[in-house]
Structure formats: C-alpha cells, structure tokens
Image (cartoon, rainbow, N blue to C red):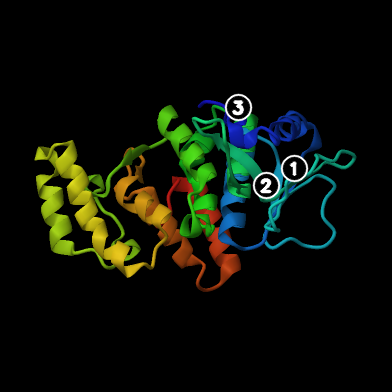
Amino acid sequence: MHSLLETEPFQSLAPVLRAAAGTLRTNSPITLCAEPTIVGALALAHLEAALLDAGIAYRRRVPPRDGLASSVIIVSEESPQVEPKPLESGPFRLTLSPLSVHALYGHDGSSHSGTLSPVAQAAALAAEIAPDGRRVRMLRPWMLAGNWHSDALDTSYDPVYSRLRDHLRDEGAFRVVPLPSVTEPDAALLPTIDGERMSATKDSWSGLDEQQRAEALSEIAAPEVFNGSLGTARLEELVWHRLVVSNSPRDLHSQFAALQTRFSGDEIEAANSSIDQLLSTGEVE
C-alpha cells in the first residue's frame, strides 16, 4: 500500500496520525469511542482492524460512555474544522473529526477543497499502525464510504472523494469500471434506469468502441438525469466510476447502500454487527 499521508488531503493531519501510530502500543489498552452511525462504525472498523493485526489491546464503546479509560480514540462527527485536533498525551487522547482540506490542485494551480471524513482518517491511521496487516488491507477500499455517505456528491464535485478514489485505484485496492461491467449492481441505486436497455448494453458492451460506449452510457443515464433525484457528481460515480474489488460479486457502491439499510432500525446493534462483519469478511451483506 502507498502511504495516504503523502497525499494532498492528509497534508495537515499527517504529523498527528504519525505521532499517534508511534505511541499507541505504549498506551494500550486503547478505548475506541463512536456514536452508532455509519461513519462511527466504519471508522472503528478500520481502527480495530489495525489494532487486531498489530496485537494491541483495545475496547469498543458504541455509544461512548462516561468515565473513559486514560487512552482513548474518539470518532467525532461535528462540523468540519480547518485545523486537525492535536494529539494529547498524559493521557493519550486522539480525536478524529471532519476536516476541511485541500484535496487537488488544478492545472492552473488553483486549489480544490473538501471535507476529509473520519473514516478516511481512521483508514490512514490504520495503515500506519499495521501497514501489512491482513484486515487493514481487506478494509482499505471502505475508506471512501465516509465521503460517499456525506452530502457533498449531491451538491457538487467532491475533490477529496475523487483524490482518494484515484489513489486507491492506482495502488490496486479496486478497479474503477463503468456500470455495464458490474456483475450484480444494486438496482435501487438507479431506480429509473431502463432494465431492458441496461441488459442489452451489457450484452453488447465488449463489442463497442470508445465512442459507442460513451453514447451507450449517456443513454443509460438519461432517465436519472431527467429525474433529477441524484446530484450530477453522484450519478457520474454510479454510472461511469463503479468500484469493483477482486473476488467480490458486488461492487462497493452496492455494499455502501446495503450498509445504509442496516441503520434504519436499532442503530447500536447495526453498528456493532457491521463492525464485526467487516472485520470478519471485509463485506456487508
């Protein structure tokens, strides 16, 4: 894996995460705290994967409780901050909260900013703790889910999501493919697409040239464009940039949707069961 801390979105946070990774073992056991939300569950899953791979003792607290242990990592979902919260020592205390960051620089040198989710922060810290860990590698693709479940892609282009997606693609965490190349996409993600047209396109896809594929994708997306229920950036991801992990029949966007469905009932149970399943299989059913 290539270090996420060397990418633009982590420029301001990298020193904090490196320091935390370097002192975790001497501060164990670590108490991990988060609210029973999708972001909380995903962030804790990444952290627990690293601590298990590294053999560092920890406790999970969902939701957080009074009387926290001396060494703690807290996943917060407050409003985005412009500066990362510093690592505290004596006792050890690290807070991962949404962070406004510079994510990309345009050809003209202009900066494109967005929000770095606590999920991505937890994944980056996990890779520093256990870079060769089996569970850490298995959960690596899920670092995008925090930004995916935010509303940024519904209102505008999310440069943080795009930068992290391209980084993970380049290191081989998943493939980025158009919708017709996905074996079992969740139909509920694009409800107005014509199923017969989609099936016909998949059958002919291998024989189409680049221009024909572009036209076919535009025709597939047209009903969703006219419907207007999805932001343009989210629609582009669901039609042109689906994420496929090797040996998994379902693309990641379909699994992101399955995870969201889990949180429609008992959120505490959903959070704990989702963390356990992700640590066991790297997927959500």
Q: Is residue 135 left or right of residue 227?
A: right
* Residue name at image x 60 percent, y 49 percent: 117
Pointer 3 residue: 6
* Residue name at image x 12 percent, y 40 percent: 208
What's under tag 1, amino acid-wise? Pro
Q: CA distance from mark 2 to mark 1?
A: 7 Å
Q: Is residue 267 left or right of residue 249?
A: right
Numbered disc 3: secondary structure: helix
What's under tag 3, amino acid-wise? Glu
Q: Position of residue 245 (x, y in %)?
A: 36, 40
Lower sequence index among marks 2 and 3? 3
Q: CA distance from mark 3 to mark 1?
A: 16 Å
Tag of residue 229: none
Pointer 2 residue: 99
Pointer 1 residue: 84
* Residue name at image x 30 percent, y 63 percent: 224
C-beta proximity under 8 Å, tags 2 and 1: yes
Q: CA distance from mark 2 to mark 3?
A: 16 Å
Numbered disc 2: secondary structure: strand
Q: Is residue 102 left or right of residue 158?
A: right
Q: Looking at the rendering, in which quadrant would you find the C terminus? A: bottom left
Q: Position of residue 89 (x, y in %)?
A: 87, 38
